[in-house]
Image (cartoon, coloured by chain):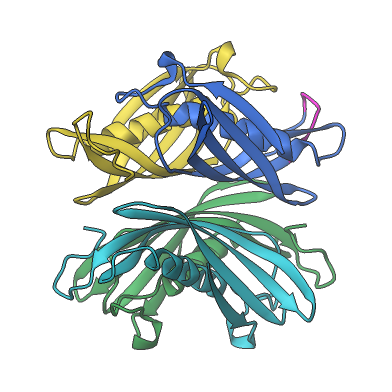
Chain colours: A green, B cyan, C yellow, D blue
């Protein structure tokens, strides 16, 4: 499991003062990608094929903890799920859940991208 | 149709120098949200219920154009689709496609969020 | 939690003899819908707004158990997740995972559909 | 583009007499899968990696036309989108839209599944 913390900063909020979906998804996508990478070959690189998120509640303050975990690691594709929580003091609110598909890519800058 | 332009800046890239999925999704989510808002009641506000993206190719340079459009506008829910293109000079590459569900929320700061 | 069992019958398979995605999704959608219904008002009816599935492994024989659970129950929308397992004797294989958004609809045949 | 027609038969409906999401998704998944197959190598087989659908309106009668089209064909993965319409006489109603990721699999019964 990989966990990324993201403070709910003003410059990341939308019109209501809630953390923008883009910021939340960036943290969740990264957490899922790194989780996938832990089970890939040593020299592999990881790219996101697709990602689906449900936003469950707005994150307004404190810190967001975005967690990614591998559901199924295949030779080519790795499926991950992730969850994000707004943590304010002792209280954690479940703010988003994601499913994502990751693909292994050879770590060679001249290689075609793993989406090819 | 709403279009948002996002330059592929270095501070928005991931380990391969490709635009991070989070930045791409922020632009697509905003384009879909504003598209949905154009068909909502005058005082309504819009929140993202859920979003699903397929990343089709990496965006490496130039500008990303993220377009959002309404597929179906309901009383409560609006379904949008969006597409993002990397534009470098005259060439446009399709880099991502999304489906998103948006919900109308009364524009009253004391109102419960539209996810309630 | 709601669990639906579906035997892997020949008439539900695709070209490789694997259970067709449509059959698997029918079971998962129903399990999630009934799970959502358990937390809705007494006279409410439930409709699927959207559903996203990752197929993790083929189901070839035995019985599929499709489980649905509520992640977040709101006034209007309920978010569910579900998982399906191929069960052959003592062995269970995780074959699919879903996220779904359900909406409550008044149980009145003349009412507009909850997608309106 | 691949189009599959499915009559709205009573035995495929849910509690409101609407076509069950499972039946609709079976048709859309098949249309997308066959569309992907048209651009894969001659001996390849196709499997669904993941699929996401938004249900836009209920299908109550007539025939459903499910169309699948390739958005991007890669060496390994093919991304498709699809749309379903309820057709009654001259009227067509847009009832669902999907995004799906398909994977090519060697047509060899002893081969590992393309999800491996």
In this view, which residue lies farthest toward the front?
D90
Where D86 falls versus B56 (above or below)?
above
Q: Could you tell me how many numbered marks the image carries?
A: 0
Q: Quadrant of residue B48?
A: bottom left
Residue C21: % across, % down: 56, 30
Where A26 falls versus D27 (above or below)?
below
In the picture provided, is B25 more to the left or to the right than A83? right
Residue D100: % across, % down: 60, 45
Residue B34: % across, % down: 43, 70
Q: Is residue D50 magenta?
A: no
Q: Residue at x 36, y 70 (%)?
A: A65
Q: Is residue D106 magenta?
A: yes
- Of D59 and A71, nearer the camera is D59
Q: Quadrant of residue D106?
A: top right
In this view, which residue lies farthest toward the top?
C10
Per the rendered image, the range of residues in magenta is D104-110
In the picture provided, is A32 more to the left or to the right than C77? right
- Of A48 and C91, nearer the camera is A48
Can see residue C88?
A: yes
In this view, which residue lies farthest toward the right?
D42
Can see residue C85?
A: no
Residue D78: % across, % down: 71, 47
Where A111 falls versus B71 (above or below)?
below
Give the position of the C terminus of chain B as an image quadrant.
bottom left
Q: Residue at x 28, y 31 (%)?
A: C34
Q: Residue at x 70, y 42 (%)?
A: D103
């Amino acid at each position: 499991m990989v966990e990324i913390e993201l403070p709910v900063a003003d410059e990341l909020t939308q019109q209501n003062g809630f953390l923008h979906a883009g910021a939340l998804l960036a943290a969740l996508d990264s957490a899922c990608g790194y989780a996938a990478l832990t089970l890939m070959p040593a020299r592999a690189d990881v790219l996101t094929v697709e990602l689906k998120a449900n936003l469950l509640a707005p994150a307004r303050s404190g810190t967001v903890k975005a967690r990614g975990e591998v559901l199924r690691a295949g030779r080519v594709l790795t499926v991950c799920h992730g969850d994000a929580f707004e943590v304010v003091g002792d209280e954690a609110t479940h703010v988003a859940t994601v499913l994502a598909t990751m693909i292994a890519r050879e770590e060679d800058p001249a290689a075609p991208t793993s989406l090819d």
